[in-house]
Image (tube, rainbow, N blue to C red):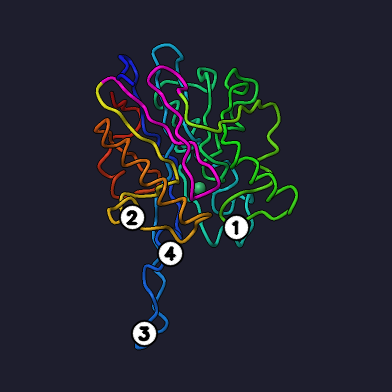
Amino acid sequence: MKNVKGLEISILHTGWIENDKAINFLLPKTGTKSNPTPLAEWWRVPSIAVLIKHPEAGYIIFDGGSRRGDEVGGGGRSRRDEQIAPLYIEEDQWADKQLEKCGVTVQDLSAVIISHFHWDHIGILECIQGTKAAQNVYVSKKDFGYGLVETHIKKSDVPTTYFYRNFEIPGLTYHYVEEDMEFLPGIEFIMLEGHTPGIIGLVIHAEEQTYILPSDAIYTAKNYGPPAIVPGLIYDSLGFFRSVEKLRKIEKEYHAKIIFPHDPDQLAGLKTAPYFYK
Ligand SMILES: [Zn+2]
């Protein structure tokens, strides 16, 4: 696929999540005979969404940050879940406010792509009710179905991941993505796995550079390696490695730049909204 003139992306920084490093990297500090109880390491990772400016389709958002109420003390998640992965967010870091930083409102969005339905990726959905984007919400069929069963059949709000209320936002029309496909000129959906049963990743052939957005299939550059390091929070560890291999091929083919979803070191070196990368 060719790079497309006028295709650009802006990185939206949608707050900070704190958690045990063992969620991001399996066994970061293994207990040993001489040190059987090593201390957990608590750290902070950013959350991001990406605004895409497409020459024909206009503005599209990929992932949507967290939902109001999910911040510390907000009441949207259980106290226990807030303890496992507290969210700290400034008022201007909600996804709709980040759009405004770029001079864009939710009314200007033509579509929303949700890589997977974990709580820190769906926040934009309640902001788009009644807009044209509400009729164009793209989700991973495997992930969406799995999340629905977990929350609505098993009735378990899985800690740090899926929550019942996030599937109950009225007025949205979902389109299922099941396989790799061209979404628009210059934008490809690629199906990834491991973190959940199926994550939508994007390959964006922007004007000057191809970007890969793997979302939580690969949290950080350190997870990507080489060597690849599987996260502690994982649905299918072998699927994780398959995703890594798939991404390496695409990265090589297009000399692409991968933008990781929860990487504090990488984000520190990136320009965020309102800057657009070409
Ligand atoms: Zn996730």
Whether the residues at callouts 4 and 3 have beta carbons within 8 Å, the answer is: no
Whether the residues at callouts 1 and 3 have beta carbons within 8 Å, the answer is: no
Residue ID for mark 2? 228
Give the extent of the magenta segment.
182-207
Alpha-carbon span between mark 1 and mark 3: 29 Å
Residue 204 is a magenta residue: yes
- Which residue does the image show at 35% across and 40% down from the upper left? 247
Alpha-carbon span between mark 2 and mark 4: 15 Å
Alpha-carbon span between mark 4 and mark 3: 17 Å
Residue ID for mark 1? 159
Three-letter residue code for mark 2 = Ala
Mark nearer the N terminus (1 vs 3): 3
Three-letter residue code for mark 3 = Asn
Alpha-carbon span between mark 1 and mark 2: 25 Å
Left or right? Give the position of 255 relative to 23: left
- Helix, strand or loop under label 2: loop
